[in-house]
Image (cartoon, helix red, strand yellow):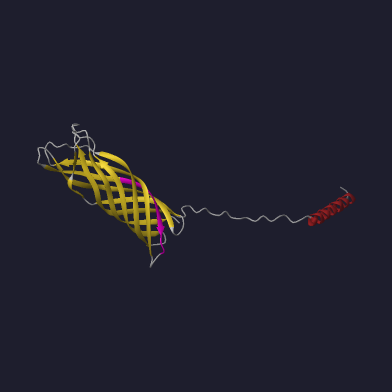
Amino acid sequence: MSSLKRNLFLSVFGAAMSATVVFAADLPAPPVIEYEPETPIEIGSSWYLRGDLGFTIYEGANASWTLNSGATRYFADQSIEDGWVGGIGAGYYFNEFFRADVTLDYRHGARHKGTAACTPSPCSSRESVDFSAWTLMANGYVDFASFYGVTPYIGGGVGVAWLNADNYKTSHVGTYVFRSNTETNFAWNATAGAVFKLADNVKIDANYRLVSLGKARTGRETTNTATHPVKYKNLYAHDFRVGLRYDLN
C-alpha cells in the first residue's frame, strides 16, 4: 500500500471513530437494575411442640352386668386405682392470647375393683378389671397476661378415646371370666394451667385437665355361656401434668 493510500485510509478510519464516539455520547444512559434480595420464608414460625407427663385420679365406672335371665346386677364397693398419663402434641399461636393444639395421650392400666353378687345366694365375689386408654384431642386455649413471668391459661377440647378393658379377674370359683375389649368413645376435656418461660423457646407447662373418657365394656365370657358383657359407664380422669413446650420460631 502506498503512503498516499495509507494516509487516506487512516484519515477515513479516524473520522469514522470520532463520529462513533460522538454518536455514543448522544445515546441515553442504560437503565439501572436494582437487585432486591428475596425475603426468607420463616419455617416453623408460630408453631410449637409439647410433651407432658402426669398423675391421674379416676372416678366413675359404675359397673353392672346383665345376666342371661335379664336381671341386672350392679357392683358395690367400687374403686379405681390411680395411674399415670403421658402425651405429645403440636400447636399454633394465633396471637398472644389464643392458641390451639392437637394432643395424643396414653393412660396406663388402672385397676377397677368391685363386689358382685353371686350364686348360690347369699354370696359375693371381688371382681377386677384393668383400664387403659388412648385419647386424641383438638384443643383451644386462652392465655392471660403474664404475672411475674407466669402466664395462666384456660382451655378445652374434644376428640376420641379408645378405652380398653382387660385382664378381668374374679375371686369366685365358677363365676364368668370375660375377654378384653376396646370401646371407641367421644371424649372431651377442660383444662387450666400456667406457663413459666424457661428460655427463649422453652416453657414449662403445669396444668390440671379433666377428661371424660366415656364408657367401657368387657368382651364375651371365655366359655361363651354369658351373653352379656360387664359394662362400665361415665369414666373420668383427673390429670395433674407437667410438661415442656418448645416454640419453633
Residue at the image point whose x is 37% and y is 57% from the top: 154
Residue 245: percent from left, percent from top: 38, 56
Residue 106: percent from left, percent from top: 30, 47
Tell whether 177 sits left or right of 102: left
Region in magenta: 134-145
Above or below for 187 versus 119: below
Q: Total marks drawn?
A: 0
Residue 30: percent from left, percent from top: 72, 55
Q: Which corner quadrant holds the C terminus?
A: bottom left
Residue in the foreground of this view, choosing between 104 and 19:
104
Residue in the foreground of this view, choosing between 189 and 67:
67
137 falls in the magenta region:
yes
Q: For residue 123, what is the image quadrant?
A: top left
Q: For residue 93, what is the image quadrant?
A: bottom left
Residue in the foreground of this view, choosing between 61 and 153:
61
Residue 207: percent from left, percent from top: 33, 57
Tell whether 210 sits left or right of 43: left
Residue at the farthest top position: 224
Residue at the image point whose x is 37% and y is 48% from the top: 158
Residue at the image point whose x is 34% and y is 53% from the top: 190
235 falls in the magenta region:
no
Residue at the farthest right position: 4
Tell whether 24 sits left or right of 38: right
Residue at the farthest bottom position: 148
Helix, strand or loop for the magenta stretch, by majority = strand
Residue at the image point whose x is 24% and y is 43% from the top: 232
